[in-house]
Amino acid sequence: MRVLTQLVIKYLMLGLITVLVLPAVAAVTIGQALWAALIVTLVAYVLGDVLVLPRGGNATAVICDFVLVTLVFWLLPFVMPVAVGLGAALVTGGAVAVGEILYHLYLNSTRPRSTQQS
């Protein structure tokens, strides 16, 4: 249940950011932005939040998320009929990276602490 909550929160954050930023900087509809946010949510959760964040820390995970989001949005025209250039992908990736800083703080505060036995 905890993972589902984390995914919903991440999707709401990414959906809000992409709906506000992507249509303003690229020829993308709100529906396309929400679909793209869903794709990014699933990929970025597994790669950035499950694999990188616990091992590399917040800064490394944010950089990973920035690169991932930028690449996904830049390559989006290959899977959806949208026009997203590198500049629009960089702007969206930057906006998402700022949101990810806060999201990672939330994740770290809700992760169970390991107990050490003496």
Image (cartoon, helix red, strand yellow):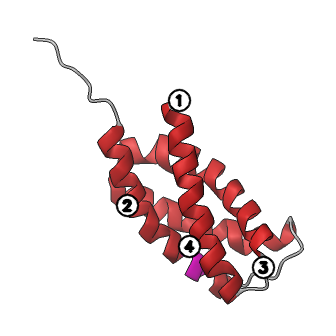
The residue beneath circle 1 is 1
Q: Along the polypeptide, which appears first: circle 2 or circle 4?
A: 4
- In space, the residues marked 2 and 4 are separated at their CA atoms by 15 Å
Residue at the (89%, 74%) spot, across then down: 81
Can residue 68 be spotted in the picture?
no
Residue 74's place in the image compared with 15, above or below, is below
- Chain part drawn in magenta: 89-93
Residue 90 part of the magenta segment: yes
Q: Along the polypeptide, which appears first: circle 2 or circle 1?
A: 1
Q: Residue 102: which numbered mark, if any? A: 2
Q: Residue 28: which numbered mark, if any? A: 3
Left or right? Give the position of 72 relative to 90.
right
Left or right? Give the position of 2 relative to 46.
left
Write down the quadrant of residue 72 in the picture. Answer: bottom right
Q: Nearer the viewer, residue 98 or 24?
A: 24
Q: Along the polypeptide, which appears first: circle 1 or circle 3?
A: 1
Most extreme residue toward the right is: 81
Question: Local crowd at mark 2 within 10 Å, few (<14), some, or many (≥20)?
Answer: few
- In space, the residues marked 4 and 3 are separated at their CA atoms by 15 Å
Q: Along the polypeptide, which appears first: circle 4 or circle 3?
A: 3
